[in-house]
Image (tube, grey):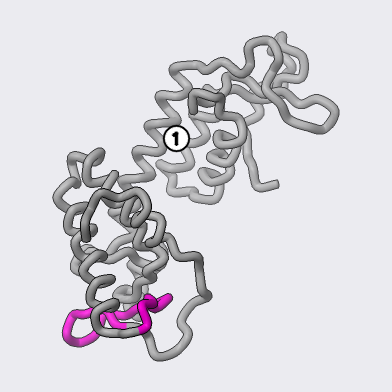
Amino acid sequence: NDMLYIDYNKKKEVKETGAITCSEAIRYGMLISVLMRNQKDFDGLMRWFLKFKNKKGLLSWQQAKHHNSYCNNPDGGDDSATDGDIDVATSFFYAAHAIWDHEFNHKTFKPLLSDWSEEDKKFLYVTRPSNFILSAFATFQIKDTERSELWGKVLDATISTLQRQLKKYSTGLISDVMKCSSKEHYEPVRKEVLESDNDKVAVDSLISVDAR
């Protein structure tokens, strides 16, 4: 699978049988990987977190390996460790900040295709509406107080683009990929640029209180 963990018991010094990692080890890995912009490792560790978070949404303290399978240590392993969860939350906070820094066009306030787009003029003004995750932008606007005004502009820009497309075309459908035109409006591209993706805009219509 694509999960990663930090093996903190290579020297077999931990008393719990089969113990391989703990939330403190995972936290250091997530912090280091996000600070080093190592998204592959961060994603792998995040999958471990999602696999072993407990019913309260916190990372279970200790995992073990038994019979070639991973599980929470039965001796209190599904309880959390506060220091581990604080650093895990910090790593997510850093990752959220990196999203604005490297995955948005700072002039048009539209999501980029990826962080490589910021260095490629051909794709700097290309966006994909499946990245218009309005519910997330609204959450960032509330929670990320340092960038609240910027996230508000992102929300306004993406909603206005969707409204313009729905008003201009009668199909009721949104193009998979758009590019900024000379009039500074995002228009559907005339040929395939990237693969298609699942539409996340509809999710916001179910949970948002924004009348737009």
Does 88 sit left or right of 11 as displayed? left
Q: How many marks?
A: 1
Q: Position of residue 129 (x, y in %)?
A: 37, 69
> Considering only vertical position in the picture, is 3 above or below 56?
below
Direction left: furthest residue: 149
Q: Position of residue 90 (x, y in %)?
A: 37, 32
Direction bottom: furthest residue: 190
Q: Position of residue 159 (x, y in %)?
A: 24, 65
Does 207 sit left or right of 180 as displayed? right
> Considering only vertical position in the picture, is 58 above or below 170?
above
Q: Residue at x 40, y 41 (%)?
A: 35
Amino acid carrying mark 1 in the image: Leu
> Considering only vertical position in the picture, is 50 above or below 14?
below
Determine if the magenta segment contains residue 13: no
Asked whether residue 115 appears in the rendered view, the answer is no
Asked whether residue 29 appears in the rendered view, the answer is yes
Q: Which residue is mark 1?
A: 31
Where on the picture, by quarter, is residue 50? top right
Assign a secondary structure to mark 1: helix
Q: Nearer the viewer, residue 33 or 97?
A: 97
Quarter of the C terminus within the rendering: bottom left
Q: Residue at x 63, y 11 (%)?
A: 76
Label 1 packing within 10 angstroms: few (<14), some (14-19), many (20+) = many
Does 106 sit left or right of 33 as displayed? left
Q: Residue at x 49, y 50 (%)?
A: 39
Q: Magenta residues, as a range?
A: 171-187
Determine if the magenta segment contains residue 179: yes
